[in-house]
Amino acid sequence: LGMPSVPVKLAERRKTRRINVGSVPVGDGAPVSVQSMTTTVTADVGATLQQIAELTASGCQIVRVACPSQDDAEALAQIARKSQIPVIADIHFQPKYVFAAIDAGCAAVRVNPGNIRQFDDKVKEIARAASAAGVPIRIGVNAGSLDKRLLAKYGRATPEALVESALWECSLFEEHGFRDIKISVKHNDPVVMVNAYRLLASRCDYPLHLGVTEAGPAFQGTIKSAVAFGALLSEGIGDTIRVSLSAPPVEEVKVGAQILESLGLRERRLEIVSCPSCGRAQVDVYRLADEVTAGLDGMEVPLRVAVMGCVVNGPGEAREADLGVASGNGKGQIFVRGEVIKTVPESKIVETLIEEALKIAEQMEREGVAS
Ligand code: SF4
């Protein structure tokens, strides 16, 4: 009697409205996009564009820039024009910068209308200007800046408090017929965050921007984000993601891309299947795995490479991969697409794998696999 077969895929993506952040669609089944935020002073146009270029090269699809001053607002037009990816202006409290960002050609604005409600008609004017320009708005609720009224009501930033805040912010735009919105409800605790997004997903059809806020330094923040995004995305919740790390933003993009690749939500590029090594290993697996990863960094075709320390699981994994090595006795059996093509000494394993990987990549490119 066989086991019943279990589907090997994530839950269907949640049905949402679609917004367009410049050229990048978000929601309604569009691929989950990766975004980040610059750390330069936005008014320093050269440095900001340089960082955006680095982010773009690392696979970032949408970039956000902070706009806390008039100088920053004045820099937006040049940045939006020269950036290769859509630029979102991040604005707090100051409606005049929202208008400046829309005029500057920013692809979207992050602003919480609750922040600017005291300026009477400003929310209405923002809704009108954004609508006329086709500029969507992200409403971003963060645990650290939760409305005082909701903090008093719930005692702390609970999932219910975050969601009530976000939906109230949305209603301020909806009153004026504006629904070109995506929402985030961020918290630094992945469990609170996951529950907040689940609740939010059940209460609206806006696309959702996932983020664990203030997730911490790279190691901790990577794990918190992977755990939280993994839980939500596997339930079909989440349309665009931002990993927040106390580390250079390029690292955020790499982590975000890796999360999507791990879930099969983005085509895998280079994937190294390497064993953890153990008392049976007859080669230095860590060094081999690191050197092969470094040697194949930037490879544009999807390639699965197995680096295995001995003959227990080695041949099986190496055979399943596009390319692999199963080591033993200071030697490596090199597999290409399931067949052993040669056996080389340990000192030649890395260069042989890289050589063979390049041949496979060329062949795939000829066959049009690379996008
Ligand atoms: Fe140990 Fe071999 Fe498994 Fe690597 S492949 S962990 S060396 S048993």
Image: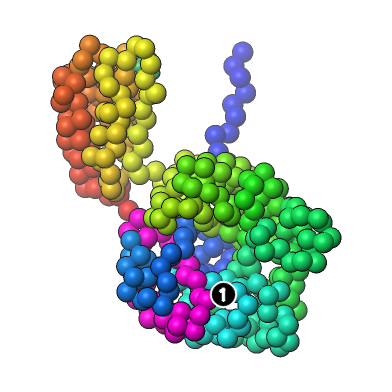
Q: Is residue 136 left or right of residue 218?
A: right
**Residue named by callout 1:** 91
Ligand 1 quadrant assignment = top left
Q: Which residues are magenta?
A: 55-84
Q: Nearer the viewer, residue 314 or 87?
A: 87
Q: Nearer the viewer, residue 335 or 172?
A: 172
User: Is residue 266 at all visible to an observer of this figure?
Assistant: no
Q: Tell me the kind of residue under disc 1.
A: Ile
Q: Residue at x 47, y 70 (%)?
A: 65
Q: Residue at x 74, y 66 (%)?
A: 147
Vertical side of 41 occupied by 74: above or below: below
Percent from the top left, x then y, of residue 169? 72, 70
Q: Quadrant of the N terminus?
A: top right
Percent from the top left, x then y, of residue 159? 74, 52
Vertical side of 216 occupied by 136: above or below: below
Vertical side of 25 occupied by 157: above or below: above
User: Is residue 285 at all visible to an observer of this figure?
Assistant: yes
Q: Secondary structure at mark 1?
A: loop
Percent from the top left, x then y, of residue 41? 42, 72
Q: Residue at x 67, y 58 (%)?
A: 143
Q: Quadrant of residue 136?
A: bottom right
